[in-house]
């Protein structure tokens, strides 16, 4: 049975997009309303007349005027019995070995309504964001589809009665140091069930004591705050929020054996190395706070949004030594770029990973990636895999870095946007000009905007079935886009198909992308082991007796395409339109970018999502 489902969410985030795409694929009619105000939600319910309201990501309660009128299913990132707004934060900080997702029906209590479905999963030593995009999303999908199927089949009573988690605490329970005895047993005990009400996690709960915390503890605290809100700390005496942490290797720390805990030691790929009591961590991102340790509520200014740590503190970081590492190196040595090779001589596969935080590829990152591409092209491989990052393949230009340029004397957001898109184009061109071997883009994580078209620059694109693609630019202030998309997209979908895809501005499942011919393969296996399966498949491609013929056919096609219309012409035409986006009279791109970077609240739901409007 097809249902009319209204997605109510704080923002149309990765989980909301995945559920939207999957529920549409199941035949349900979907519309989206962003949670702006109770009156707006009431208006949406009146206009769309949904059979069901689904809330995958909210920061406020659903008003009683809505949940009393239509069933509302809330997706909570915790197992049954867990309650509170910081469920995943607590689980990551306390290194709980197993966690879950619960779909419950909204009523007057917070996170305590009747349970319709739930799913559990093993935790990884990963950031909150990484777990959310992979394990939480997969569990939420399973539980949500189960709940929706049961509701669509006519069931109107939840799978379980209300879990006895006790009454919601008073407001004081969210204050630093409030009693949290409702956790019950030791959270490391491995119990899959929840532990009752847990308050909003405060900065005091995340605070790092550099004089006593070991690396594992520091990493857990940074991971549980990754993305938002970050861990409040200080760099060079200046209060800021830290994030994007990676544990340093023993080899790296051996050089700094005489350093003191908490000391800043070196720079690599824009990350700052900081000593712990038993090792060190690389801190990749930082965001300034004011002297009271809060983000100013006045007009946003330089630094009060996430940036590459060494760029935010450029003057101070310049005094630290640079410690770059080669592409080929031990597995425990962190850097944003990594290269490995597999297979015998004559049938070898090269894997180039570029794991940039949130998939953001600023000018400097693009330049380093292009240099790495040119380097690995000199290696004797038959297939080159472009592996992107674990969480994101790529999301295109770095909007935060562009926003930072708007606050630098002698620079501008338009100028940095122009430099960034040129650098992105240079990376895509380096892939397109790799004609002496087969190239494959491997989407381990989501891809958006220019990141999708960077992937399409390879001969083939393979993705895991959990990946969501956003192959369009217009949501960012009607941006036209580059990365040779006007060449790459029509050759896969045709002119009409390319126009339809770019105009839809909707998230796309990997399975649907394969079905329409946008990508070549969609791996249906578990996410664990995906990389190994990809390398095995690539080894088969490299050792195939037709490998030489495929390369020759590729070269012939590229030569024919170049003769018909040079790549330089596509780039020139795209950049002419981008120049108007950056420097023209219409400020839509700059307004949209500013709102995105500073996470300003939405004033309305985009009409391509809110079809009821």
Image (spheres, helix red, strand yellow):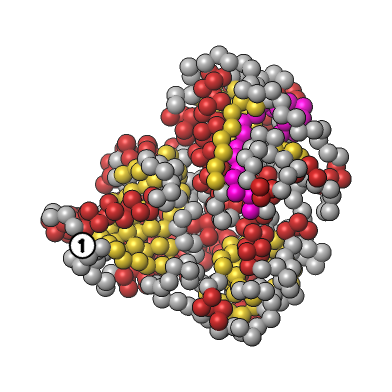
User: Where is residue 481 drawn, in percent x and y?
Assistant: 42, 53
Q: Is any atom of residue 556 visible in this view? A: no
Q: Is any atom of residue 103 visible in this view? A: yes
Q: Quadrant of the C terminus?
A: top right
User: What residue did someone put label 1 on?
Assistant: 347
What residue is shown at x 41% (from left), y 58% (from top)? Answer: 388
Q: Secondary structure at mark 1?
A: loop
User: Where is residue 236 drawn, in percent x and y?
Assistant: 71, 77
10 Å neighbourhood of mark 1: few (<14), some, or many (≥20)?
A: some
Residue 178 shown left or right of residue 537 in the figure: right
Residue 4 shown left or right of residue 599 in the figure: left
Q: Image height check: is 137 above or below 583?
A: above
Instruction: Reply yes or no: does residue 110 show up in magenta.
Output: yes
What residue is shown at x 46% (from left), y 49% (from top)? Answer: 446
Q: Which residues are magenta?
A: 95-113
Q: Residue furthest top?
A: 154
Residue 199, quarter of picture: top right
User: Where is residue 389 drawn, in percent x and y?
Assistant: 45, 58
Instruction: Reply yes or no: does residue 560 show up in magenta.
Output: no
Residue 472 shown left or right of residue 433 in the figure: right
Residue 121, quarter of picture: top right
Q: Nearer the viewer, residue 10 or 187?
A: 187
What residue is shown at x 41% (from left), y 76% (from top)? Answer: 326
Q: Nearer the viewer, residue 374 or 183?
A: 183
């Amino acid at each position: 049975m097809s249902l009319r489902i209204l997605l109510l969410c704080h923002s149309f985030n990765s989980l909301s997009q995945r559920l939207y795409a999957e529920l549409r694929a199941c035949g349900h009619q979907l519309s989206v309303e962003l949670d702006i105000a109770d009156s707006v939600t009431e208006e949406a319910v009146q206009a769309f007349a949904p059979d069901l309201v689904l809330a995958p990501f909210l920061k406020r309660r659903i008003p009683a005027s809505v949940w009393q009128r239509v069933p509302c299913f809330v997706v909570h990132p915790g197992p049954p019995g867990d309650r509170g707004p910081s469920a995943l934060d607590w689980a990551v900080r306390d290194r709980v070995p197993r966690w879950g997702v619960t779909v419950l029906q909204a009523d007057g209590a917070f996170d305590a309504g009747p349970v319709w479905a739930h799913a559990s999963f093993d935790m990884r030593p990963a950031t909150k964001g990484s777990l959310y995009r992979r394990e939480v999303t997969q569990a939420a999908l399973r539980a949500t589809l189960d709940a929706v199927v049961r509701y669509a089949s006519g069931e109107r009573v939840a799978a379980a009665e209300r879990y006895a988690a006790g009454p919601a605490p008073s407001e004081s329970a969210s204050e630093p140091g409030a009693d949290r005895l409702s956790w019950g047993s030791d959270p490391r005990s491995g119990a899959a069930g929840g532990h009752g009400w847990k308050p909003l996690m405060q900065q005091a709960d995340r605070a790092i004591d550099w004089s006593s915390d070991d690396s594992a503890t520091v990493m857990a605290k940074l991971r549980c705050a990754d993305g938002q809100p970050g861990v409040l700390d200080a760099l060079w005496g200046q209060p800021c929020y830290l994030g994007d942490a990676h544990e340093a290797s023993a080899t790296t720390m051996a050089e700094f054996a005489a350093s003191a805990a908490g000391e800043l030691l070196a720079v690599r790929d824009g990350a700052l190395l900081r000593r712990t009591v038993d090792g060190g961590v690389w801190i990749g991102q930082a965001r300034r706070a004011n002297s009271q340790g809060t983000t100013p509520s006045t007009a946003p200014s330089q630094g009060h949004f996430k940036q590459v740590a060494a760029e935010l503190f450029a003057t101070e970081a310049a005094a630290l030594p640079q410690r770059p590492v080669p592409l080929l190196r031990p597995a425990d040595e962190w850097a944003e770029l990594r290269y490995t090779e597999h297979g015998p001589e004559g049938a070898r596969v090269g894997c180039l990973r570029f794991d940039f935080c949130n998939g953001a590829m600023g000018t400097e990152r693009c330049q380093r990636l292009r240099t790495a591409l040119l380097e690995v092209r000199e290696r004797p491989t038959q297939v080159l895999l472009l592996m992107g990052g674990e969480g994101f393949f790529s999301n295109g230009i770095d909007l935060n870095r562009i926003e930072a340029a708007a606050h630098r004397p002698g620079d501008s957001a338009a100028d940095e946007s122009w430099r960034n898109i040129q650098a992105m184009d240079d990376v895509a061109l380096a892939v397109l000009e790799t004609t002496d071997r087969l190239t494959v883009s491997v989407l381990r994580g989501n891809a958006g905007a220019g990141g999708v078209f960077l992937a399409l620059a390879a001969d083939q694109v393979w993705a895991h079935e959990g990946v969501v693609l956003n192959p369009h630019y217009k949501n960012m202030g009607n941006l036209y886009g580059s990365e040779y998309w006007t060449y790459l997209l029509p050759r896969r979908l045709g002119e009409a198909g390319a126009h339809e895809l770019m105009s839809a501005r909707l998230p796309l499942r990997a399975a649907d992308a394969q079905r329409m011919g946008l990508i070549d393969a969609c791996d249906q296996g578990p996410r664990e082991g995906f990389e190994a399966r990809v390398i095995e498949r690539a080894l088969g491609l490299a050792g195939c007796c037709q490998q030489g013929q495929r390369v020759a056919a590729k070269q012939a096609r590229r030569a024919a395409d170049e003769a018909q219309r040079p790549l330089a012409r596509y780039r020139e035409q795209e950049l002419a339109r981008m120049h108007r986006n950056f420097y023209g009279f219409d400020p839509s791109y700059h307004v949209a970018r500013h709102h995105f970077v500073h996470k300003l609240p939405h004033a309305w739901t985009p009409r391509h999502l809110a079809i009821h409007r």
